[in-house]
């Protein structure tokens, strides 16, 4: 009788081939799945990092009504007038700057009761926030109100900038707690001072200052100038 069929060896070869093919296919599928999961985690992590702000306000936002272009009375040749157009800068004479921190108390502050011109606030890292670079190449400060928008105010590094002696539309920072580098890290605090553009804002006027880091969410600070502007006001 003529009979045909698989021998045990042939069946084993076929079964082994199926097992190998299934294993290779499973490896490809699993590898693609692991890669997809990894990429998804990276996208989620990046997204969370971008929308989560690493900085928060520490304390109140302070506004100042400093008059622009004040000539200090200790300067040589002072004649008791305002001078916003002078180009020289002799002694303690700061024409074209907001008047702040002059050496003698009698002329240290010159108030502008019409315009809120300078704003200062303090930043610290939020809980588990990553270090924030305050370098002007990494951090941008923007400004807007109902009449104007400045996407990037000018960073100024003159020696009196951290004391408020700045031209219009500028910003500066100083580390008030922590080491002296440009990174705002855990348990550190930085003061940001902003001179508002175009002579500032008038009473009861809303304005927004935006802190825009290279990585992380933009921190918008929206405040209203007080009904009566003084040398120093807590802004709400």
Image (cartoon, grey):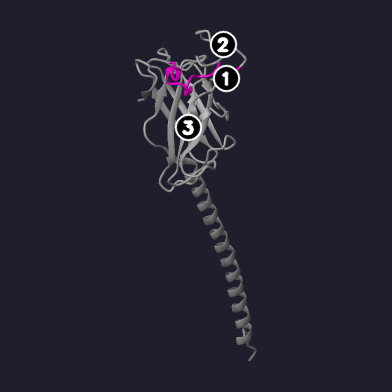
- In the displayed structure, 213 sits above or below 106; it is below
CA–CA distance in space, label 1 to label 2: 10 Å
Residue at disc 1, secondary structure:
loop
Determine crowd level at label 1: few under 14, some 14-19, many 20+ residues with C-alpha closer than 10 A: few
Magenta region includes residue 26? no
The residue where tag 3 is placed is: 192
Determine crowd level at label 3: few under 14, some 14-19, many 20+ residues with C-alpha closer than 10 A: some
Residue 10 vs residue 53, the one in the foreground: 53
Q: Main secondary structure of the magenta part?
A: loop
Residue 128 vs residue 66, the one in the foreground: 66
Return the x and y of residue 137 as percentages of the image width and height.
Answer: 60, 36
- Residue 4 appears in the picture as rendered: no
* Disc on the earlier residue, 2 or 3: 2
Residue at x-position 63% and y-position 81%: 13
Residue at disc 3, secondary structure:
strand
Return the x and y of residue 139 as percentages of the image width and height.
Answer: 54, 35
**Contact (CB < 8 A) between labels 2 and 3?**
no
Determine crowd level at label 2: few under 14, some 14-19, many 20+ residues with C-alpha closer than 10 A: few
Residue at x-position 62% and y-position 75%: 17
**Contact (CB < 8 A) between labels 1 and 2?**
no
* Disc on the earlier residue, 1 or 2: 2
Q: Which residues are magenta?
A: 89-110
**Contact (CB < 8 A) between labels 3 and 1?**
no
Return the x and y of residue 16 as percentages of the image width and height.
Answer: 60, 78
* Disc on the earlier residue, 3 or 1: 1
The residue where tag 1 is placed is: 91
Residue at disc 2, secondary structure:
loop
Residue 162 vs residue 220, the one in the foreground: 162
- In the displayed structure, 224 sits above or below 80; it is below
The residue where tag 2 is placed is: 77
Q: Indicate left or right for 98 with 204 as reference.
A: right
């Amino acid at each position: 009788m003529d009979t045909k069929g698989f021998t045990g060896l042939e069946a084993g070869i076929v079964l082994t081939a199926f097992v190998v093919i299934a294993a290779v296919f499973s490896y490809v599928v699993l590898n693609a799945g692991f890669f997809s999961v990894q990429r998804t985690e990276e996208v989620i992590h990046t997204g969370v990092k971008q929308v989560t702000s690493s900085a928060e306000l520490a304390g109140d936002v302070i506004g100042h009504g400093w008059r622009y272009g004040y000539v200090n009375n200790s300067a040589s040749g002072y004649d008791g007038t305002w001078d916003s157009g002078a180009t020289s800068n002799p002694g303690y004479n700061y024409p074209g700057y907001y008047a702040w921190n002059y050496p003698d108390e009698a002329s240290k502050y010159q108030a502008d009761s019409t315009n809120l011109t300078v704003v200062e606030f303090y930043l610290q890292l939020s809980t588990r926030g990553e270090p924030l670079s305050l370098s002007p190449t990494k951090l941008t400060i923007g400004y807007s109100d109902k009449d104007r928008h400045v996407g990037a105010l000018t960073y100024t590094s003159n020696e009196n900038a951290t004391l408020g002696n700045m031209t219009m539309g500028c910003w500066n920072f100083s580390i008030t707690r922590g080491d002296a580098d440009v990174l705002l890290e855990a348990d550190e605090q930085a003061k940001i001072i902003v001179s508002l553009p175009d002579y500032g804002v008038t009473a009861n006027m809303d304005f927004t200052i935006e802190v825009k880091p290279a990585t992380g969410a933009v921190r918008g600070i929206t405040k209203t100038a007080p009904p009566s502007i003084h040398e120093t006001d807590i802004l709400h």
